[in-house]
Amino acid sequence: MLRRIGALMGITAGSLGLALLAFGTGPTPLGGASSAATPAVAGTGGPDLTALPLGDGKVTSSGPRRGYVYSCQESFGGPAAAEVPWIRNSSYDLTAKYTVDGAVNWPGARFNKKLARKLLKLSGNGLPTNHPTGAFPVAASDDAYAVDANPNSISAQSVALKLSGRPRRLKRAQCTPTGQVGIMRNGVAIFNALDAGGKDAVAHEVQDSCSGHPQQSGVYHYHGLPACIGSGGAGKHSKRIGWALDGYPIHGPLGSEGEYMRTSDLDACHGHAHKIRYQGRVRKLFHYHATEIYPYVISCFRAEPVTLDSSGRGAQQPPPARALPG
């Protein structure tokens, strides 16, 4: 079934480890959805979702650059991206993208956070606590199969993440790894903007109606602004929707006056600093903004990020750039 993503505007240290190891937790397929996408939030100056700028080629390994992903990976060997009808020249139509069919509930989803001794401790199993997912692997009967036959299944993980509760801004921003750069408040991983071929993942890859899909190890994740995480109403600063691996918070797309954050409003890491409410009081703090404009969420780290599990399992690998039917 072909479905269209509606106007989603705003629907939305140290070497401490993140362990993500698969274990069994059963889904409830195609049962009543636990949550639907929240209503759109209209921010002043929001983008035209039918003509979003394509981020292909906007990746650098030499240092932070506004509008680019500062990637630790210097070369990409993923397969060529499939031709898709919603990409035209240098732009794409987000409202015309295919979404993966299905509404799979995850009754065993869990996510907890605790602030203790200047550490923000986050734990869970990587499954969304607030919304269903699409049915993965993508079924041959799904329209999405023709352009992105993602063969991966979603599986529970063991998430144990310790972030700095008081991140310190570095003089020079750090590059982002291929894969996870943060975690959302519903327990789902957020990856950087790139697919395995180094292209714009949001534009080229197919996700479910909540903006997520799994990679090879079963880690369900987003690449951009999630459609099913609310970030507050119009006319005011967006609420926090997650945390980067450097400890800084991630907010939705609207700024302090309710204006939509454009690339020109943000720094090279897709964030900025001003007074926000954080840990119960108002303070001037750097924070990232998740938007529908590439590079979407985090393009470099402003503080020292935690180190992911050295085994390479979990959120280390992005999904295949294109898994086309044979």
Image: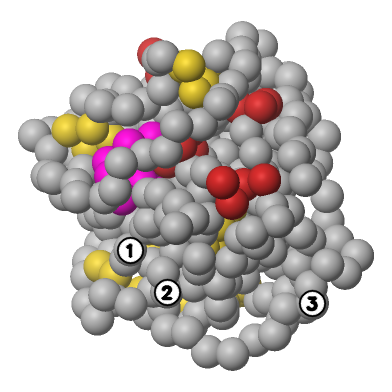
- The secondary structure type at the circle numbered 2 is loop
Q: Is residue 32 left or right of residue 269?
A: right
Mark 2 → mark 1, Cα distance in angstroms: 8 Å
Q: Is 30 drawn above or below residue 232 in the view shown?
A: below
Q: Nearer the viewer, residue 180 or 87?
A: 87
The image quarter in which residue 182 lies: bottom left
Q: How far apart are the two marked residues, 3 and 2, measured between alpha carbons?
A: 20 Å
Main SS, magenta residues: loop
* Callout 2 crowding tier (Cα within 10 Å): few <14, some 14–19, many ≥20: many
Q: Residue at x 37, y 79 (%)?
A: 19
Residue 217: image tag: 2
Residue 317 - label: 1
128 lies above or below 249: below
Which residue position holds label 3? 28
- Does residue 103 appear to the left or right of 270 in the view shown? right
Mark closest to the chain's N terminus, 2 or 1: 2
Amino acid type shown at disc 1:
Gln
Q: Tag 1: Cα neighbours inside 10 Å, few (<14), some, or many (≥20)? A: some
Could you say where residue 191 lies in the image, as x and y percent from the top left?
Answer: 41, 52
What residue sits 66% from the left and 27% below the top? 96
Q: Is residue 258 magenta?
A: no
Across and down, in percent, residue 193 comes to 39, 41
Q: In the rendered image, is residue 286 in sight?
A: no
Question: For mark 3, does the 10 Å Cα neighbourhood hold few (<14), some (14 to 19), or many (20 or more) residues?
Answer: some
Instruction: Give the residue furthest to the front.
Output: 326
Q: Nearer the viewer, residue 253 or 321?
A: 321
Q: What amino acid type is highlighted by mark number 3?
A: Thr
* Residue at mark 3 to residue at mark 1: CA–CA distance: 26 Å
Q: Which mark is residue 235?
A: none
Magenta stretch in the rendered image: 192-200
**Residue 257, horizontal then vertical, whole percent:** 63, 16
Q: CB under 8 Å between callouts 2 and 1?
A: yes
